[in-house]
Image (cartoon, rainbow, N blue to C red):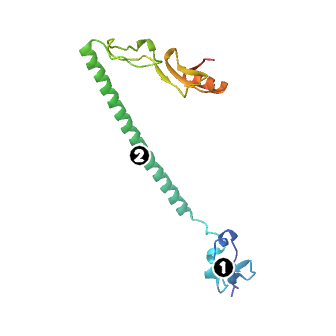
Amino acid sequence: MTEHKPKFYFIDFEKLKGESVNTIPYFLGIVSFSEDYEYFDKIKHLLDIPEPPKSLEEIQKELDDKFEELWVKTKRKFFVSKESADYKFKQFCKKQDADFEYARENGFFPPKLTGTLDYSKFIVTGSSSNNITSSFVIKQGNNHEGYYTFGNCRSFKYYMPTKPNFVSRFCMDKLLGFKWIDEK
């Protein structure tokens, strides 16, 4: 008759961190436990027990399931991409049809807004009885060092009480197109 040799398992201290105080008496200074220990079932969830190796069929099934899931996700993404492209193409065709209809009625295609704005194209119409001002001014109190203006248009002025530092002025000029004008 062969002698049964018990398997010993070590305590997993990471699992033990959140455990209640009631399980401590089962340990009593022992570091590893065998399956023959009378309270093994009560502390089994705290032990570092290696999982049995998976069979080749189980590994193959998991791999097949992952491939199937990836295949379904890929098909779904292609379908959504196709639907999106179809929608965008239909919108493009509608826009083109509207442009041709406009050209048929007016003799030219509608103008496209591209590039930078040309401020000379803006026109203010009205008679002398209308009270139209051609400038837009924002002030912060009566004391000001200067103002920002937009591009070459001097009718827009944003006055500031203190002169911004060089970095602020540089960024406002290069990134936003606002030029600083000193008044003092």
Of residues 66 and 169, the one nearer the viewer is: 169
Is 153 on the left or on the right of 52, as rendered?
left
- Residue type at numbered disc 2: Arg
Which image quarter is the N terminus in?
bottom right
Coordinates of residue 136 in the picture (x, y in percent)? 46, 21
In this view, 123 is above or below 69: above
In this view, 30 is above or below 89: below
Is 71 on the left or on the right of 98, as rendered?
right
Residue at the front extreme, as displayed: 142
Residue at the left extreme, as displayed: 105
Residue 21, which numbered label?
A: 1
Of residues 80 and 118, the one nearer the viewer is: 118
Q: Count residues near mark 2 (Cα–Cα under 10 Å), then give few for <14, some for 14-19, many for 20+.
A: few
* Residue 178 visible in rendering: no
Q: Name the image quarter holding residue 2.
A: bottom right
In this view, 154 is above or below 87: above
Of residues 72 and 107, the one nearer the viewer is: 107
Residue at 32% x, 26% y: name it: 93
Q: Which residue is mark 2?
A: 76
Disc 2 is placed on an element classified as helix
- Residue type at numbered disc 1: Val
Residue at the right extreme, as displayed: 29
Is 173 on the left or on the right of 5, as rendered?
left
